Image (cartoon, rainbow, N blue to C red):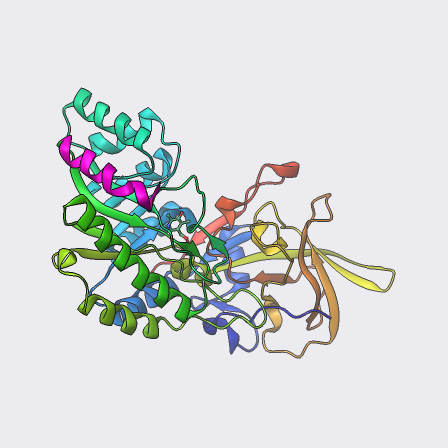
């Protein structure tokens, strides 16, 4: 038997049929009309946001919409956050539909001229990733007669320790190396653009509060140093994010209250050049991952050489991350449950596999579950981030998953 991650707190203590936002899993499937489906519980998202607000009252909260770009979810989350971070013109259009342009920032290497034009004319902030991109943006500003709003994304000489995905402290396609950032700020200011500040993102999926605290302190120091060098005070410093969620056995949920207390202290003693600066944190998965449940139906159960396979109608085509093929080195089990029998003792060691003709399509590997029958619903938790939109839905030609966003 192999371990699996813990269910999110909202589901961990349930007994009997799985309840999502006040309704059973069967109810949601009936409303959807079919399986597989994702249900996103907006009350859980709102609870995470409320917790952030209490822990970090002075910090702006941005939602990185690549974690879950579903339109209904964006509509619901937009009034609860201060900004939306996008990384393509498609995401930009979705963000502009729900939030004023001045609160939208656009990051990502390789922004095309038409994407720069769309952002500049709408009035969104470009997180500029290179000198070349800055030059193109300034030229588009001249051509359109609209002053571009530009922040400089810095490739920090800091890395976020223990983060699942390190984005700093090394050669990177993201941002401008810290040693070149001040010169770029000067050029942007000299060109008459509206310089918005710095975007400094050092990593993702960190669960160690000590590592985040260290990185935030170093990020504030770096922003101050660059501002001094550039001779300009940044209106905004986006400190990145990197708040992780517990997917796997042994993971401990991040203590954001501790992070918030340390950040308040670091900001209280910040260098004078940052006195008037606002600070933002951009989060994706921490806001939405635990709110999502993926429901898939058992099609067949079979034995092979002593192993029992539960074969379900959804797989890595919808939930790539749960199969261990989205940025993890070693495959580990996401939290799973038999939706009809929450809280029941596990009796069997089973493997849950999807319908795709590839051995990669394994959603649960030798996990302990209560009795399972053909027709049961299997629930896969932690499905609110990097699920439907981050999975190869065209692979093998099955229908796309249905997605339902609950009323908040
Ligand atoms: C992906 C990304 C995020 C969101 O990351 P999470 O781990 O989901 O919080 C935030 N900022 C940037 C720049 C990103 O690329």
Q: Vertically, is 35 above or below 275?
A: above
The structure residue drawn at horizontal position 48% and vertical position 44%, both measured from the top left corner, is 389
The structure residue drawn at horizontal position 73% and vertical position 48%, both measured from the top left corner, is 359
Q: Which of 80 and 243 is in front in this view?
A: 243
How far across and down, in percent of the image, does residue 346 sit?
69, 76
How far across and down, in percent of the image, does residue 399 sit?
58, 40
Q: Which residue lies furthest to the right in this view?
A: 305
Q: Vertically, is 230 above or below 385?
A: above
Q: Does the magenta stretch include residue 178?
A: yes
Q: Vertically, is 378 above or below 349?
A: above
Give the quarter of the image for residue 350.
bottom right
How far across and down, in percent of the image, does residue 251 sit?
53, 70
Quick check: can you spot residue 395? yes
Q: Which of 238 and 226 is in front in this view?
A: 226
Residue 149 lies left or right of residue 62; in this view the side is: left
The structure residue drawn at horizontal position 29% and vertical position 48%, both measured from the top left corner, is 199
Residue 2 lies left or right of residue 290; in this view the side is: right
Magenta-highlighted residues: 176-191
The structure residue drawn at horizontal position 26% and vertical position 40%, both measured from the top left corner, is 96
Q: Most prominent secondary structure in the magenta stretch?
A: helix
Residue 1 lies left or right of residue 21; in this view the side is: right
Query: Split into 4 quadrants, where in the image is the N terminus?
Result: bottom right
Q: Is residue 284 magenta?
A: no
Query: Split into 4 quadrants, where in the image is the C terminus?
Result: bottom left
Q: Residue furthest top?
A: 143
Count of picture labels: 0
How far across and down, in percent of the image, does residue 55 sit?
28, 71
Residue 72 lies left or right of residue 343; in this view the side is: left
Give the quarter of the image for residue 77.
bottom left
Quick check: can you spot residue 117? no
């Amino acid at each position: 038997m192999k371990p699996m991650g813990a269910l999110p707190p909202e589901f961990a203590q349930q007994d009997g049929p799985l309840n999502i936002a006040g309704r059973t899993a069967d109810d949601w499937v009936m409303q959807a009309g079919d399986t597989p489906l994702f249900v996103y519980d907006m009350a859980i998202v709102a609870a995470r946001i409320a917790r952030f607000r209490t822990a970090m009252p002075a910090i702006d909260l941005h939602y990185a919409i690549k974690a879950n770009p579903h339109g209904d979810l964006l509509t619901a989350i937009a009034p609860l956050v201060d900004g939306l971070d996008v990384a393509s013109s498609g995401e930009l259009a979705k963000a502009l539909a729900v939030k004023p342009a001045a609160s939208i920032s656009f990051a990502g290497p390789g922004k095309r001229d038409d994407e720069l034009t769309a952002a500049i004319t709408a009035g969104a902030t470009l997180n500029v990733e290179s000198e070349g991109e800055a030059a193109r943006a300034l030229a588009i500003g001249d051509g359109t007669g609209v002053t571009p709003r530009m922040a400089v994304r810095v490739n920090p000489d800091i890395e976020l320790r223990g983060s699942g995905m390190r984005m700093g402290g090394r050669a990177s396609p993201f941002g401008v190396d810290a040693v070149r950032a001040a010169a770029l700020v000067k050029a942007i200011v000299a060109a008459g653009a509206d310089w918005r500040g710095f975007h400094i993102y050092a990593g993702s999926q960190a669960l160690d509060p000590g590592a985040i605290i260290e990185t935030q302190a170093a990020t504030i120091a770096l922003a101050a140093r660059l501002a001094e060098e550039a001779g300009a005070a940044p209106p905004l410093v986006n400190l990145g994010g990197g708040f992780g969620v517990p997917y796997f056995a042994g993971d401990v949920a991040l203590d954001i209250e501790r992070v918030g207390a340390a950040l308040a202290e670091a900001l209280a003693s910040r260098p004078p050049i940052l006195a008037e600066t606002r600070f933002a944190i951009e989060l994706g998965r921490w806001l939405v991952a635990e709110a999502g449940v993926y429901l898939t139906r058992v099609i067949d159960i079979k034995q092979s050489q002593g192993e029992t396979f539960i074969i379900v109608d959804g797989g890595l085509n919808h939930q790539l991350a749960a199969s261990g093929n989205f940025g993890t080195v070693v495959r580990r089990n996401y939290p799973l449950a038999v939706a009809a029998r929450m809280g029941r003792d596990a009796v069997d060691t089973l493997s849950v596999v999807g319908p795709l003709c590839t051995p990669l399509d394994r959603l649960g590997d030798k996990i302990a579950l209560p009795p399972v029958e053909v027709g049961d619903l299997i629930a896969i938790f932690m499905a609110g981030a990097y699920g439907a939109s981050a999975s190869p839905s065209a692979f093998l030609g099955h229908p796309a998953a249905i997605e339902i966003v609950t009323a908040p």
